Structures are given as C-alpha cells and as structure tokens.
Amino acid sequence: MADADRVCVCDADAADAFAGARYSESPTTQIANRAGSGCAGTAAPVVLVPLATASSLICGNAETKGSPLASARIVTWALGSGGPDRREDGIAVEDRSTPVLYLELGDASAEACAERARALARLPGATRVTWWQNCALGRTDLPMRVRDGNSLLVVEADDDFVPLPQPADASEAHVFVRHPRPSQGVLTGAPTLGLLIVWISPRAPDLAGALRDWGDFVHIRHIADAGIPGFTQISVYENQKSADPLFMHFYEFDTLEAEETFSTMVEHVASRLGGTDSEAYAEWADWRVGHGRLFYCNTFRRLGEELG
C-alpha cells in the first residue's frame, strides 16, 4: 500500500510541534519527524480533523477504505471551548480578518525570501510575513497580464503598514486593504499551507460594483458552496491605490498541494451547475460576464514565516 493511501493519527506532542513550527523545512516533514515512526516517511499533506471524525477511519498505517481523507495524515483534537485565536489544544486559528495584505511577486530564492521577510516583519504595523513557492510557474491556461514569479511574500499588517521599496527582482508589489464584504468558505482548524492568488479588475471604473457582485454572489459563492476538499477561506481585498489590479481574491488551502487542489475546482463546481455545457456554468466560469479583466492567477505552497 502506497503512503498516499495511508493515514496516521498523530499524538498531542505532534500537534503542539505543528502549532509552533516556523517551517524552516516542510511542515509535513516537521510533523512527521516529531510524531515518530507512525507518521515518518509519509508524503501526504497534514489534515487536522475532530477526534469523532478520525475514529470513523481505520487509523495508524491501515487502509482508509475510500475515505476522502485517504491521502492525508491526520492530527486529532478534542472538541472544546477554544479562544478567539487558538483552539483549546493551542493550535493557532488562521485569522483572515487582516485589514492589510502586502504582496511581493518575484524571483527570489527561499533564502532571500527569508531575509526579506525579516526586514518586512520589523516594519510598523506588520504582524506576520510568510513566503511561498509558485506551484505552476509560467502557466499558460489562464491570461497573465503581469510577469510571473517563482516566489511570493505576503505581509499581514494593520493600517499603519508602509512597505519598503520594491526590490529589483520583484515583478509586482501591491498593498491590498480588506473589502467590506465578508469572507466565504469554512474553518477547518488547520493552518493555511497553500494559496490561490487571483488579481482582477473591472473593464471600466464604473463597472467595479458589477464585478464585485459577480465575484461575490456567483463565482466565489459557488466555489464556497461546493465544499471542495482543501479549500478553506476565500477573502476579497482591494488595491490601496485604486489601481490595477483593483481586486484580489485570496483563496486559502489547508494543504501544501495547492495546484492539485485548484485543479479539482471545476469538476466540483460544474457538477452543481448542470455540467460544463450549462448556462449557469458559463456564467460562473467567465469573468467577462462580470465585466472583469483577469490580471493574474496562480497557486503557491508555503515555505516559511516570520512574526512581526
């Protein structure tokens, strides 16, 4: 039986290790190494599930008999009264009420990203900086109006944040502020390990409201409704300068396999809308219906973080 077909329920020490990880190595490698031989050697992403859910699986190194979590290693927790930013067991809950996100897309090495993250994290207003690896560099299946890059830095900040000058190797750098409409999706309790970044603008300034209505009530709505495995929160941000790209759709995944997760989106949504030949699917899939221009769309896997 391949490792991808097995699951492992890790102990509390492994969960604590995962909560405190700073991802100098892969999070899945860290938790496997700290959880002991029961999880070591597996390459599947970590998924945290309630104990009641895990108890219905055949755990350890046994088959999961077709469970949707068959490709995941599992960390269990006991349900309880957690705080606003942490579960009862101490695992941090991802907070995407962040008022400001600053993104740098470029071609920096992982080491250079870590150094840049340390500098950005010291700025007033910065609370956390994460850096990410592009999962589909140079993709050609979607329009790209900006130069792609193999690295992404994301600064989570408040309204006092002012970024450093854009580095020479960065193709794009933007400050986005939180849009008033709420996030959509689910809370799984697991940390964000993958991202889908979408930058989009209206075809004319007076069409911004129409684009937002299409994005929020048609496109994102059906993605959230589909309950796609790996998808968690979807939040909308607006360019601080009111320039292109005007909006960012910030999709969070609780798996490192961001591109693979993104690739399942169409099949999950299409089946709810009558198939890929239906009018409902065409309305959902084509951003031009919402008077939009797609600037950028790509997936990323998490490499590290620096706290502000």
Image: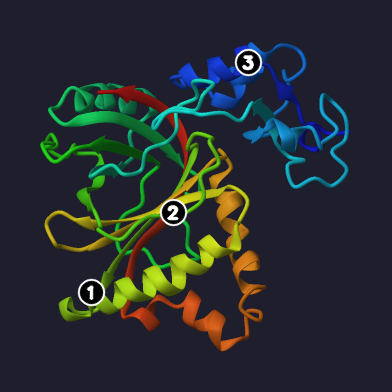
Mark 2 or mark 3: whose residue is earlier in sequence: 3
Q: Quadrant of residue 264?
A: bottom right
Q: Position of residue 86 (x, y in %)?
A: 44, 27
Q: Which residue is mark 1?
A: 208
Q: How is the image coloured?
A: rainbow
Which mark, by number, is residue 12?
Answer: 3
Residue closest to the eye, 275 or 9? 9
Label 1 to label 3: alpha-carbon separation: 48 Å
Residue drawn at (35%, 40%) of the image:
152
Which mark, by number, is residue 298?
Answer: 2
Residue drawn at (33%, 33%) of the image:
108
* Between marks 2 and 1 in the image, the one whose residue lies nearer the viewer: 1
Q: Amino acid at mark 3?
A: Ala
Q: Amino acid at mark 2?
A: Asn
Label 2 to label 1: alpha-carbon separation: 22 Å
Say if 160 sits above or below 36 in the image: below
